[in-house]
Image: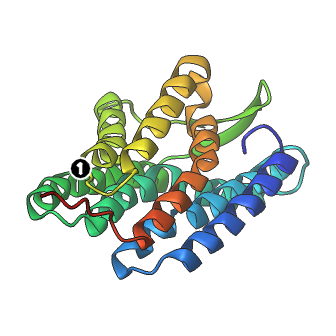
Amino acid sequence: MCFSAGASFAGGAVITAIGVLTVTKNRKPSGRLFASMPLIFGVQQISEGFVWVALQSSGHELMLSISAFIFLLAAVVIWPVMVPTAVYLMEREKRMKRLLLLFVGVGLLTSLYYGSRLLFYDIEPMISHHHIKYVGDFPRTFATSAFAAYLAATLIPLFLSSVRRMWILGVLMAISCLITGIFFKEYLTSVWCFFAAVISIVILWIIVAERRPATIIATT
């Protein structure tokens, strides 16, 4: 979570436990990547806990650098390609898979864009109004387009998927992003990840639903 070190560590532990349960409940090879998403959320939140610790005490520059890198790696590099790829792998309809493959490509390009910024430019975490703000010295060229691509790659596939209840995850993530963008715009990277982590339980719900056979209604 993004409000304190304690909240980040506690939240990360809970979400990691949900992730372990989700991976355990998954029975389909095609769902392995999707089922592992809460685990990534958990690692991400724990890493931000270390960012909090390093920022609130002196002499922890290496901890700050490593933990911030891990957090941002997950937030802006892994998610844009992981979400559409996970949805693509679970998709059963061939025509929809071809469409989802387009978003995998969008996510990959988005990850490369943010990954290059993470590698070649300095990003400084700082505490501001009880949140962590990540400030970088990178150029703003294509920043708006990249953010739009990020949203497209991480949200649209959830609505296109024919997997049961996947659209619910899409709605929750879209609402979370909207709330974050309106009220916590300057802290979007950190606060958005809090909302996204909260809905890890929905991922577990979808995985459990996928284990059950679809109900067939006979007609005469």
> Quadrant location of residue 217?
bottom left
Q: Residue furthest top?
A: 182
Judge whether 75 appears above or below 171 on screen: below
Q: Residue at x 87, y 49 (%)?
A: 6
156 or 49: which is nearer to us?
156
Q: Residue furthest left?
A: 95
Callout 1 amino acid:
Val
Q: Looking at the image, what colour scheme do you see?
A: rainbow
Q: Residue at x 81, y 56 (%)?
A: 9
Left or right of residue 73: residue 158: left
195 or 214: which is nearer to us?
214
| Quarter that holds the N terminus | top right
Left or right of residue 210: residue 93: left
| Quarter that holds the C terminus | bottom left
> Quadrant location of residue 84?
bottom left
| Pointer 1 residue | 106
Give residue 194's position: percent from left, percent from top: 65, 42
Give residue 107's position: percent from left, percent from top: 29, 52
**Count of marks placed on residues:** 1
92 or 191: which is nearer to us?
92
Give residue 12's position: percent from left, percent from top: 73, 58
Q: Residue at x 13, y 53 (%)?
A: 99
Tag 1's secondary structure? helix
Question: How packed is label 1: few (under 14 Cα within 10 Å), some, or many (20 or more)?
Answer: many
Q: Residue furthest right?
A: 57
Give residue 139's position: percent from left, percent from top: 39, 34
205 or 81: which is nearer to us?
205
Judge whether 31 appears above or below 51 on screen: below
Left or right of residue 112: residue 8: right
